[in-house]
Image: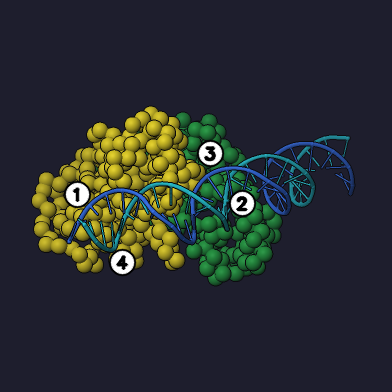
Chain colours: A green, B yellow, C cyan, D blue
Amino acid sequence: MLTQSAVPQTAYEPPFTFPSSQKPAVSNSLAPVGLVMSFGRNAEIYAEGEISGYVYRVLSGVVRVSKLLPDGRRQISAFHMPGEMFGFEAGEIHYASAEAVIPTKVVAFKWEGLLDVGSKQINVVRELLSLAVLGLRRSQDHLLLLGRKNALERLAAFLLQMDARSGLSHVVDLAMPRHDIADYLGLTLETVSRMLAELKEAGTIKLESARRVHLLDVAKLKAMSA
Amino acid sequence: MLTQSAVPQTAYEPPFTFPSSQKPAVSNSLAPVGLVMSFGRNAEIYAEGEISGYVYRVLSGVVRVSKLLPDGRRQISAFHMPGEMFGFEAGEIHYASAEAVIPTKVVAFKWEGLLDVGSKQINVVRELLSLAVLGLRRSQDHLLLLGRKNALERLAAFLLQMDARSGLSHVVDLAMPRHDIADYLGLTLETVSRMLAELKEAGTIKLESARRVHLLDVAKLKAMSA
DNA sequence: CGGGATATTGACTCTTATCAATGCCCGTGG
DNA sequence: CCACGGGCATTGATAAGAGTCAATATCCCG
């Protein structure tokens, strides 16, 4: 596997660096060669149940990682932006599936290769550990959000999170449709829409368009998100 | 830190082994010395915001890891049973707090020491990575539960999870009060109580006492948990 | 045996889901 | 260039699930 919609796989040339946005505890010392793959909108990167053997880094686009219940209910556990790594399930069966939200390029690294004892690759393993620990942290925030926050707080937190990751001017471009946001926040798309309207009412955001949100009052949003 | 209620700290003697219940990918090759600490009911093991420097293994008792919202709402991200490791936040600030649910003994290992390049400790780092990845997996399940399952499904899943971890005869001893279960499942304690009553109605469980549940029909419970 | 903490049960409320009707935006083709 | 069509989003009316508040009940522990 490693997918159908995979496209001309070109070697990804060194220097390899782990994304600075994920602050590895130890700076990288490795330049593994990865495979660059391209995916169209909604294309599957890997599926729940497939054999896993790679970890991925987003080069461009946006990736969603999700799990499904037998009756179709879906929970998105994370969105991944350029520079971020995902797919930490290697050596076994994929525990979730990953899809491109929009046209996306990723580099895939063989997990096995990364773990090879061969040399001083201990730094690589450490960086992977560091990334995994970071993932655990983010999970804790998301668990708190899903378990204990109301719909309005979830939306405020989501917008702030997207803003923090997109940097710049507090104008957030949402790559994903309402339905994806809903499945990420444990809500319905209608509720997502209503809460956005409510935040607009409160003067904390402005909807330039459905997919482009201008955060007018970040402080207030922060207050609302907790 | 590393706590007030810490008690006569005796050295934990080798051989050290990572818990088999967490299947490290690589068998252990290290016997670090840890500090054994004892905690009473509800005693704090570490608090959110404290400097972190240890990872822990439960020797006996039960540990809960949680995060708090400013207004007091609480989300328990995990319960840890004997043999399990927790506290993977080392090198930085604790992102959550951990407390003993009942009188509990843990061994604390210096994170720094575990990561030391000194030798062929690469296996230790790998095992830690393996445990972190396992933690990520469990988080995904919990996210799905919190984001998309109803109260009855959550209770069924919880009981099955506790049963799987306690082994034996489908008689589960719950160390924690209803309030903790509620904060773990993102519910209120009243709802937990009502759903248990409902499961009893359905003939899937029997409440030997408030803290002791007999799973009468595991298959049916499984069907209800999804 | 008594008493405080923990748990259950009930009545009612409130948030969010559900079902349904428009509305809007954008790309396509006439 | 404009009209059409389809996906996506918004808005409304209602329902359902879980929360809240409150009154017992039960279980330990001393």
| Residue at mark 2: chain | A
The reply to whether dot 3 and dot 1 touch (C-beta < 8 Å) is no
| Residue at mark 3: chain | A
Cα distance, mark 4 to mark 1? Answer: 24 Å
Identify the residue at horizontal 41%, vertical 47% (top origin): B192
Give amino acid for label 4.
Answer: Glu
Are both tags, 4 and 2, on one chain?
no
Identify the residue at horizontal 53%, vertical 48% (top origin): A186
Disc 2, SS: helix
The reply to whether dot 1 and dot 2 touch (C-beta < 8 Å) is no
Question: Marks 4 and 2: which is nearer the front?
Answer: 2
Cα distance, mark 4 to mark 3? Answer: 38 Å
The residue nearer to you, when weighing B77 against B134, is B77
The residue that label 2 is drawn on is A191
Badge 1 crowding class, 10 Å Cα cut-off, few under 14, some 14 to 19, many 20 or more, is some
The reply to whether dot 3 and dot 2 touch (C-beta < 8 Å) is no
Are both tags, 4 and 3, on one chain?
no
Cα distance, mark 3 to mark 1? Answer: 37 Å
The residue that label 3 is drawn on is A73
The residue that label 4 is drawn on is B50
Cα distance, mark 3 to mark 2? Answer: 16 Å
Q: Mark number for residue B60? A: 1
Give amino acid for label 1.
Answer: Ser
The reply to whether dot 4 and dot 1 touch (C-beta < 8 Å) is no
